C-alpha cells in the first residue's frame, strides 16, 4: 500500500465520520478479525447499530457501502 493510498483512505474515513455525525450517527471501525476493513454505523440517540444490505456482513459496511448508505439517508 502506498502513502498516497493510505492518505486517501484516511481522508475518506474522516469525510465519512463527519457525514455520519451530521446525520446523528457514529462511524467506527469494526472490532472483529472477520471484519477487518469494515465499519459500523450506529445511531447515537438510541445506541443502535445500523443494518447493512450485505448478507455476509449484516451489521458492518465497507467504505463504499457506508458512503452509499450515508448519501441515501436524510439528516
Image (cartoon, rainbow, N blue to C red):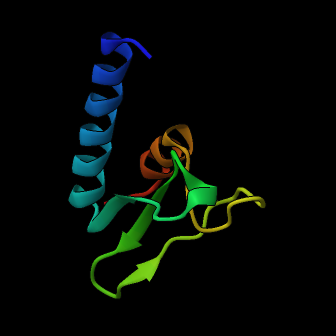
The quadrant in which the C terminus is found is: bottom left
- The image shows residue 48 at horizontal and vertical percentages of 43, 83
- The image shows residue 41 at horizontal and vertical percentages of 42, 64
Where is 6 relative to 45, above or below? above
* Residue 17 relative to residue 1: left or right: left
The foreground one among 7 and 64 is: 7
The foreground one among 72 and 13 is: 13
- The image shows residue 63 at horizontal and vertical percentages of 48, 40
Q: How many marks?
A: 0
Q: Residue, x 30% and y 65% (percent of image)?
A: 26
* Residue 29 relative to residue 24: left or right: right
Q: Residue, x 28% and y 84% (percent of image)?
A: 45
* Residue 46 relative to residue 54: left or right: left
Residue 22 in which image quadrant: bottom left
- The image shows residue 59 at horizontal and vertical percentages of 59, 68
Task: Give the residue at the far front of this rendering.
Answer: 33
The foreground one among 23 and 58 is: 58
Where is 27 relative to 17, above or below? below
* Residue 43 relative to residue 67: left or right: left
The quadrant in which the N terminus is found is: top left
Where is 41 relative to 47, above or below? above
Residue 9 in which image quadrant: top left
Task: Give the residue at the far right of this rendering.
Answer: 55
Q: Residue, x 53% and y 37% (percent of image)?
A: 64
Residue 25 in which image quadrant: bottom left
Q: Residue, x 47% and y 76% (percent of image)?
A: 49
Amino acid at each position: 500500500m502506498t502513502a498516497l493510498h493510505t492518505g486517501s483512505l484516511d481522508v475518506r474515513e474522516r469525510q465519512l465520520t463527519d457525514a455520519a455525525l451530521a446525520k446523528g450517527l457514529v462511524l467506527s471501525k469494526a472490532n472483529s478479525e472477520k471484519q477487518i476493513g469494515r465499519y459500523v454505523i450506529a445511531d447515537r440517540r438510541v445506541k443502535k447499530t445500523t443494518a447493512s444490505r450485505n448478507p455476509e456482513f449484516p451489521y458492518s459496511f465497507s467504505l463504499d457501502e457506508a458512503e452509499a448508505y450515508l448519501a441515501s439517508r436524510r439528516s
